[in-house]
Each structure stands twice: as C-alpha cells, then as structure tokens.
Amino acid sequence: MVSAPPVESLGFPFQLVARYVIGALLSVFGILSLFWLIGRWAWLADQAIIDASMSPWLFFVPYAMMTATGIALLLRSRFVFAPFAIYCASFEWRTIKVYGWHQPSLAWLVFGVQLAMLSFLLSLAAKNRLR
C-alpha cells in the first residue's frame, strides 16, 4: 500500500499579516505626511530661501516613496525594493545633509527600522511571496 505523504501544519501566517499591517501603516503614514506637506509647502518654500535643507522637495520625495512602498507591499509587487531604496537613500541623504555625520539617536532608530524592513522584504522575496 502506498501511504500519503505527511501533511505539514501551516500554522499562523505571520508574514501575511505583517505584510498587510506594515503596508497599511506605511501607506497611511505616507499619505498623512503628504497632507501635512501640502499645508506647509509655502512656509517650507520660504524657509528654503534661508536654509536649503528646508526645501519642500526634500520632504516630498521620502513621503511619496513611503506611500509607494506601502502600496507596492499591499499589492505584493516584487518592485517594492525600488521605492524602498529611493526612500532610504533620500531619508539618509537628508539627515546627513542636515545633521552631518553626528546623527541624533532618532535617526539611528529610523536606520534600524529601515534595516529590519529590508530584512523582512528580503525574506518575502526569498520565499516567493512577492509577484
């Protein structure tokens, strides 16, 4: 007699839930940040005359890419790495431009969260969970 192969227990889908939660949080936070930026655009443009690091475009790029990363994560797109890389690069460039090499502790915390997010995205890609 031929017996059936053992069935593995699926367990709780942590990556599925984490993908939806992280994608929703990134999308909502990015959209709220864009709305904040719309309200402050004129003030930031005036401040950019005095200090170039207050340019509204330096805020627009990371917020737009944060929103795009969240939407790509919700859609399970394998292209989630492109907006995430642009977000990380623009955020790090802006913090280095504003603070120099002596970063405040909050910037190091954000850098750690970005590394954790990158490891989560790589684990999703390694298990073919992205389309």
Image (tube, rainbow, N blue to C red):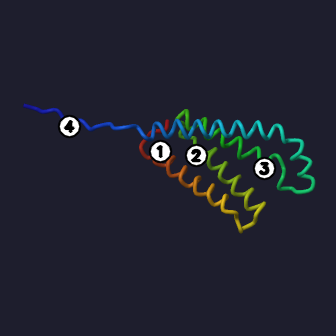
Residue type (three-letter) at the residue carrying disc 4 = Pro
The residue drawn where x is 47% and y is 44% is: 125
Q: Front-most of 102 and 131?
A: 102
Which secondary structure lies at badge 4?
Answer: loop
Q: Which residue in the protein does label 3 denote?
A: 58
Tag 2 and tag 3, C-beta contact below 8 Å: no
Q: Which residue in the protein does label 4 denote?
A: 6
Q: Give whichever of discs 2 and 1 has the lower sequence position.
A: 2
Query: How far apart in space, not on screen, are marks 4 and 3 (Cα)?
Result: 55 Å
Q: Give whichever of discs 1 and 4 has the lower sequence position.
A: 4
Which secondary structure lies at badge 1?
Answer: helix
Query: How far apart in space, not on screen, are marks 2 and 1 (Cα)?
Result: 10 Å
Q: Which residue in the protein does label 2 denote?
A: 81
What x and y, as percent, mark residue 118?
A: 54, 51
Mark 4: give few (<14), some (14-19) or many (20+) Cα within 10 Å: few
Residue type (three-letter) at the residue carrying disc 1 = Ala
Tag 2 and tag 1, C-beta contact below 8 Å: yes
Residue type (three-letter) at the residue carrying disc 2 = Phe
